[in-house]
Amino acid sequence: MTDSNSTEPTDLPYSAERLSPLHAVHVAAGASFTDFAGWQMPVSYGSDLAEHHAVRTAAGLFDLSHMGEIYVVGPEAAAALDYALAGKISATADGQAKYSLLLSREGGIVDDLVVYRTGDDRFLVVANASNRMEVAQELLERTSLFDCEVFDESDDIALIAIQGPKSFEILSQVPTVEVDDLENLGYYRSRAGTFGERGEHRMLVARTGYTGEDGFELYVAPDVAAQLWEALIETGGGSGLIPAGLASRDTLRLEAGMPLYGHELGLDTFPVQAGLGRVVNLKKEGEFVGRTAVEAGPPEGARVLVGLKADGRRAGRADYLVFATADKSATADDAVGTITSGALSPTLGFPIAMAYVAPEHAAEGTPLFLDVRGTRIPASVVTLPFYKRESR
Amino acid sequence: MADKTELQYTAEHEWVLVEGSTATVGITAYAADKLGDVVFVDLPDVGSDAAIGAVVGEIESTKSVGELFAPVNGTVLESNEAVVDSPELVNSDPFGEGWLIKVEFTELPALLSYDEYTALVGE
């Protein structure tokens, strides 16, 4: 047996591998690891399906310490980010978070980001691990004419996410965690909290995530990350909290219709193609990087991102072709689209995928065919997300 | 469950149990673990030909797809329907109930011993 479509990475020299501050905790928990942007990160702790279901029904704990944390601080930080990013960052209030994009001058997506306003003059920009260096460099260059400074704090910040319907119950019961009025911390809001017997460690608590469930992301110093992780497991274990790896994170975000950089998003993708037109604020005054290109829009007939569902149990996967016909004489040149992510949905029980397809095949209900290693699997276009949690 | 040390192995992470002229084939625990939770198994029809190195089945997990290669030449005697119905058997009991096919073989090539296979995967 060999892996014909593996997400396993190529081997890197050991020196290039980075380890999370939680690495020893993962090893002790029996994790298997995968390379992710040069980091050895847990892919699962035994059963990725069990981890997926735990997040949907109870809670899962994720180590996201590989992500990039870049602070932009100064009197003109808000204006600088309005210029550097696609959204109107200056319109956020202290404690508010905003999903945004760093665009290229050509209108492509350099990275997708969450920006947390943590004060009048300060913002935390959270970037994908694979793009951290580029985002930090771009932010430095793009903000150079503004009165603000850019600090790449990625090496000094660990990130733990607790995700799932029991997240609030668990986090609020950890004896060493203190967050004022956690109950009323709204979605896409953040607040300073503390961790430790005497509240001696600061952390940023955000009600954000990448799973389609309620949950929190906790930004802490690397040297106390293991303590916080173990405190959460100790408190939450009885409620069904288990550690969860990147494999389940991927199926969870796919069900929730959330794009992943390198799959649904990239330099050759305009935001509007990815369904992210709303993230680009063309009404905001002034110039921002990529504005001219985004206003002109992608070329006529550019493919757009859709959701696809299929019958049976065979999933279309990244890079598989999408056809408008079941006729197997159709060649790759006749394909009307390409899958960017796909899996048998653990929650829904049928195969789901996201794909870029020609606009004339993008309407809801359009029948399409997935080329799954030579077999044409019937599918149809559905609206995203595939899965939406019941509102609280 | 077969005694792992008595089985033969391929570099493609299959195990082979030889009894008379029948070879029972499955994937190793190492391979099952690397794949992650198996959610779909496609196995060959009974009576179909197996040729060394040819793809005779697929094992899909949530995150990837593995191909099952025939380790011997011969004819497929049996496909494990229990695994088709419950693919998780590949993870829970890869050397036992998670077996995949039985082949009446006409040619059995040199395969790896348990020690050689464990050296290969470094475990």
Image: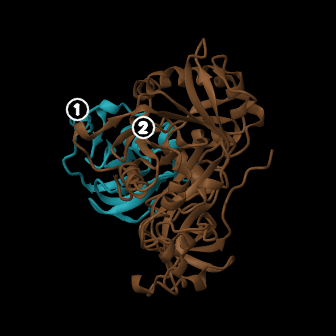
Chain colours: A brown, B cyan
Quadrant of the rendered image containing residue A3: bottom left
Under mark 2, the amino acid is: Glu
| Mark 2 element type | loop
Whether residue A342 appears in this view of the structure is no
* Distance in Å between CA atoms under marks 1 and 2: 47 Å
The residue pinned by badge 1 equals: B115
Quadrant of the rendered image containing residue A189: top right
In the visual, does A106 lie left or right of A316? left
In the visual, does A99 lie left or right of A22? right
**Residue nearest the viewer, comparing A139 with B89:** A139
Residue A218: horizontal and vertical position, in percent?
Answer: 57, 33
Q: Report whether mark 1 lies on the same chain as mark 2.
A: no
Under mark 1, the amino acid is: Asp
Residue A153 badge: 2
Whether residue A140 appears in this view of the structure is yes
Residue A240: horizontal and vertical position, in percent?
Answer: 67, 29
In the visual, does A359 lie left or right of A105? right
Looking at the rendered image, the quarter that the C terminus of chain A falls into is top right
Name which residue lies at 57% across and 28% down.
Answer: A203
